Amino acid sequence: MTRVLLTGASGLVGSHVLDYIIDHSDWDVVCLSSWRHRGNPKRLQKYADDDRVFIMTHDLTGVMPDLGPFDYILNIASESHVDRSISDPVPFVENNISLMLQVLEYARKYPPKLLIQFSTDEVFGHTEEISDVLWPSNPYAASKASQELIVSAYRKTYGIQAVVTNSNNIIGEGQDAEKYVAKLAVQIKNGETVTVHAQNGEIGRRRYNPVENVSAGLMFLIDNYEPVDQHARTPRFGLTGGRELDNLEIAKLVAKVMGKELKYEVIDVATVRPGYDQRYPKVNTKLEEMGFIPPQTLEEGLEWLTK
């Protein structure tokens, strides 16, 4: 029996990853959630009576209960909203670093076949090309970069088999309205004026990727990963898919999918978000080089907006 520890299962990405694992394997999954961040119990309701899914309330900033060994650990839990990290950075950063340490301490006690640390393209800051140089521009990005470095340290010191994945902006059904696409959907539905960020007159750009691609990519990585020596550099895999658009282009696309009119104004981002990055790099394509094909287009990943 294959056992998986999935943190952050009540969040957008975690809940979709859970769905993907249940639909595409016979694995058992243990899910931990504190319910004090953006996790939504409704995302896990359908698994209340599922023998393959065990849901436990636990704050990962504290020592994990002894749940025995796991074959795989997927650490998706983290605070992830940039604006909140800027307005109140200390508890935000402390949370993300503390939970990383506790997950790694558990992996040190019960070494898994593989630990996947779910990270972001924001750790690289603004660059034009694929990069692996960490240069975060805001407290959220810095906390994720810190998690990556701690994983690398535990990997080299204790021999934990671990990799880092980096994803671009993720979109999907059930996303919290603090995220840009979900926020756009609410504002457009209500006929409100959408704010579009620009810097020095140039509208910012992001790559938007359906959460189905992310879930499929993580499963593909588990199925195809070959361990490397603990003293080698920590393997890094980009979760590819989706498409790069500027902030106005994605707003127009959301309005088009919803069949609604778009009202918008362009504002200088310096007035609302210090440390803003105009664009993030493409993530590496190692998964695609291994044979991974993202299953959804961006338009397919936005179909939930029509419901």
Image (cartoon, helix red, strand yellow):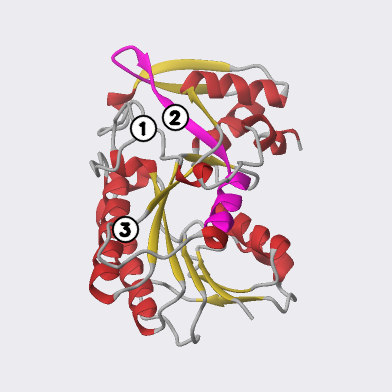
Q: Please rate how many residues cluster around mark 2, counting C-alpha atoms within 10 Å: few if below 14, some from 14 to 19, many from 20.
A: some
Is 282 located above or below residue 156 in the figure?
Answer: above
Whether tag 1 and tag 2 are in contact, CB under 8 A, the answer is yes
Kindly report which numbered mark, 3 or 2, lies closer to the viewer in this rendering: 3
Kind of residue sitting beneath label 2: Arg
Residue to which mark 2 is pinned: 206
Residue 98, x across and y down, in percent? 30, 68
Provide the residue span drawn in magenta. Answer: 198-221
Residue at the (33%, 78%) spot, across then down? 105
SS for dot 2: strand
Residue to which mark 3 is pinned: 234
Magenta includes 246? Answer: no
Residue 163, x across and y down, in percent? 39, 59
Q: CA distance from mark 3 to mark 2?
A: 26 Å
User: Of 241 and 139, which appears nearest the observer?
Assistant: 241
Residue to which mark 1 is pinned: 280
SS for dot 3: loop
Kind of residue sitting beneath label 1: Tyr
Visible residue check, residue 61: no
Residue at the (52%, 23%) spot, across then down? 194
> Can you tell which quarter of the image residue 117 is in?
bottom left
N-terminal label among 1 and 3: 3
Judged left or right of residue 191, residue 224 is left
Visible residue check, residue 277: yes
Residue 303, x across and y down, in percent? 71, 35
